[in-house]
């Protein structure tokens, strides 16, 4: 019989040989799934005309996707304890493939939105599974480089989504955005079913349905309220804009109170003890500001500006953001390696400065701006985000004890999606409200200009917050070599 005292040592010895295959399967699967966060961003104008709904409604195909992820991700803490990683993986890819099929078959906006929500349910489960697996299999002094690879998935996939969407829409209809992805997701499902084997104990834990309901109402109410504000620029809103916001904020307060009580009995849907660690909170806030600008400004506002103000085609607007996406991807591994040597602070501060500068440069663009200048500013934005993302994600989880890694990764992934959804809703709403009354409910040059100014202010807040990041390297903690 194997001595239980030697089990951790044996696990550490086996982990390096298995970690590459396991993480590789998860990374490739997540890349295909997260690509769909922004693949529709260049199609907002076409979809608005084709489906006869305003831009503020169409943007819910993106913000609704992100919001669903924010609601589902807290449940993954329960799923990862109750089921094996392989079972969670199969659920994730099956849900995503089903949603992709529904989107491809959708004749109108309603079924298209349902398909996006089903897609998001699968994508939401994949992110905490990926990050928790990395924290389990990779020793601390190598996590920066590994998280650099994950950065390629989390950041580059949504960054190049508009490029792929533009290329498809230049010759095919919007439904082909999903028919092309479907075989990729099915291939990932089959590959994972065959190769993915992770030893992980499970235990029967209760699912607090009240917490799930409060989370859904809370995040949904706030974002829906902002969306109603945008729709009120074109028509009388169905409900007062402040009503769902108030309901959402009250629900979030109750959700937090309930988790604080449940975690005393180790039954919380989302354990909030990671918030007692200063380094986690600082990195979490900066990561939220980062994703708010990455998704809201970089992936939504910029394509709208290119098509509405510069009158570029969907193909050209998609190709225009490709260089920035490639820069973000190329920086992933090097920045992770730099983080392992110097810590987060020397990377995050210049990254935040580049992000803030690029967002203010976007605010100076107008109808006469050169496409080359737009591309250059976008590359600067992506370079800044690349310097920030890997250090912040690694640093936030690295300060937590092992037993809080799964809840910390769930909180981090939740806030990323909430920030992305909030950025999409906020910036589109600002752009719509500031546009001329005869714009038909769609943003014009003046509205987009103001939205970029708001993004610039958020960039300045992130730059100020970057000075609170501590430069502490993660050192080996007696791993078996």
Image (cartoon, rainbow, N blue to C red):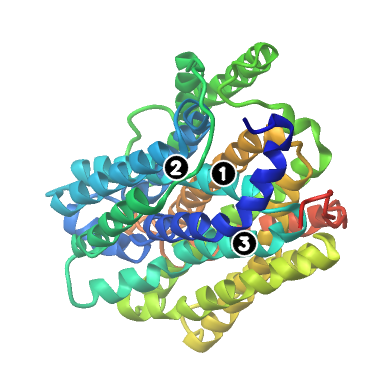
Q: Pointer 2: residues within 10 angstroms few (<14), some, or many (20+)? A: many
395 horizontally vs 29: left or right: right
Q: What's the CA distance linking mark 1 and mark 2?
A: 8 Å
Q: Pointer 3: residues within 10 angstroms few (<14), some, or many (20+)? A: some
The residue at 46%/62% (across/down) is 158
Taking 441 as reference, is 399 above or below it?
A: above
Q: Which residue is mark 3?
A: 453
Going from the N terminus, do you reach mark 1 or mark 2 first? 2
Going from the N terminus, do you reach mark 3 or mark 1 first? 1
Q: Which residue is mark 1?
A: 413
Q: Secondary structure at mark 3?
A: helix
Q: Secondary structure at mark 2?
A: helix
Q: What's the CA distance linking mark 3 and mark 1?
A: 27 Å
Q: Which residue is mark 2?
A: 124
* Percent of width and height locating residue 373: 55, 85
Are discs 2 and 3 less than 8 Å apart at CB?
no
Taking 438 as reference, is 351 above or below it?
A: below
Are discs 1 and 2 less than 8 Å apart at CB?
yes
* Percent of width and height locating residue 459: 69, 60
Taking 307 as reference, is 179 above or below it?
A: above
405 horizontally vs 220: left or right: right
Q: Pointer 1: residues within 10 angstroms few (<14), some, or many (20+)? A: many
Q: Secondary structure at mark 1?
A: helix
Q: What's the CA distance linking mark 2 and mark 3?
A: 31 Å
Q: Which mark is residue 360?
A: none
The residue at 47%/47% (across/down) is 425
Going from the N terminus, do you reach mark 2 or mark 3 first? 2
């Amino acid at each position: 019989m194997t001595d239980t005292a030697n089990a951790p040592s044996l696990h550490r010895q086996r982990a390096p040989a298995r970690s590459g295959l396991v993480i590789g399967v998860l990374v490739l699967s997540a890349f295909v799934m997260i690509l769909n966060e922004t693949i529709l961003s260049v199609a907002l104008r076409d979809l608005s005309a084709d489906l006869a709904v305003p831009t503020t409604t169409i943007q819910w195909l993106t913000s609704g996707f992100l919001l669903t992820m924010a609601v589902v991700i807290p449940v993954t803490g329960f799923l990862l304890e109750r089921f094996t990683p392989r079972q969670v993986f199969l659920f994730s890819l099956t849900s995503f493939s089903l949603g992709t099929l529904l989107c491809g078959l959708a004749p109108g906006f309603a079924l298209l939105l349902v398909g996006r929500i089903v897609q998001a349910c699968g994508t939401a489960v994949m992110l905490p599974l990926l990050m928790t697996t990395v924290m389990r299999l990779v020793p601390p002094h190598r996590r920066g480089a590994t998280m650099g690879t994950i950065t390629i998935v989390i950041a580059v996939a949504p960054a190049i989504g508009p490029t792929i969407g533009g290329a498809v829409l230049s010759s095919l209809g919007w439904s082909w955005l999903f028919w092309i992805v479907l075989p990729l997701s099915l291939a990932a499902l089959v590959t994972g079913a065959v190769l993915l084997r992770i030893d992980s104990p499970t235990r029967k834990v209760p699912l607090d349905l009240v917490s799930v309901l409060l989370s859904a109402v809370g995040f949904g109410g706030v974002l829906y309220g902002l969306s109603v504000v945008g729709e009120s620029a074109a028509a009388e809103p169905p409900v007062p804009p402040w009503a769902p916001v108030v309901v959402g904020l009250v629900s979030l307060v109750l959700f937090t109170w309930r988790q604080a009580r449940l975690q005393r009995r180790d039954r919380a849907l989302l354990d909030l003890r990671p918030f007692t660690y200063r380094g986690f909170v600082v990195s979490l806030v900066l990561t939220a500001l980062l994703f708010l600008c990455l998704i809201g400004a970089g992936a939504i506002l910029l394509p709208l500006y290119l098509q509405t103000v510069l009158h570029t085609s969907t193909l050209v607007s998609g190709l225009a953001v490709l260089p920035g996406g490639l820069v973000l991807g190329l920086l992933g591994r090097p920045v992770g390696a730099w983080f392992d040597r110097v810590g987060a602070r020397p990377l995050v501060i210049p990254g935040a400065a580049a992000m803030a500068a690029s967002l203010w440069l976007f605010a100076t663009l107008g109808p006469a701006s050169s496409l080359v200048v737009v591309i250059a500013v976008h590359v600067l934005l992506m370079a800044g985000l690349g310097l920030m993302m890997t250090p912040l994600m690694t640093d936030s989880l690295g300060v937590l004890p092992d037993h809080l890694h799964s809840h910390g990764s769930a909180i981090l992934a939740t806030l990323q999606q909430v920030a992305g959804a909030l950025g999409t809703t906020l910036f589109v709403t600002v752009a719509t409200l500031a546009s001329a009354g005869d714009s038909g409910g769609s943003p014009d040059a003046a509205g987009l200009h103001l939205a970029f100014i708001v993004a610039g202010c958020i960039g300045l807040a992130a730059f100020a917050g970057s000075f609170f990041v501590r430069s502490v390297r993660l050192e080996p903690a007696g791993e078996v070599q």
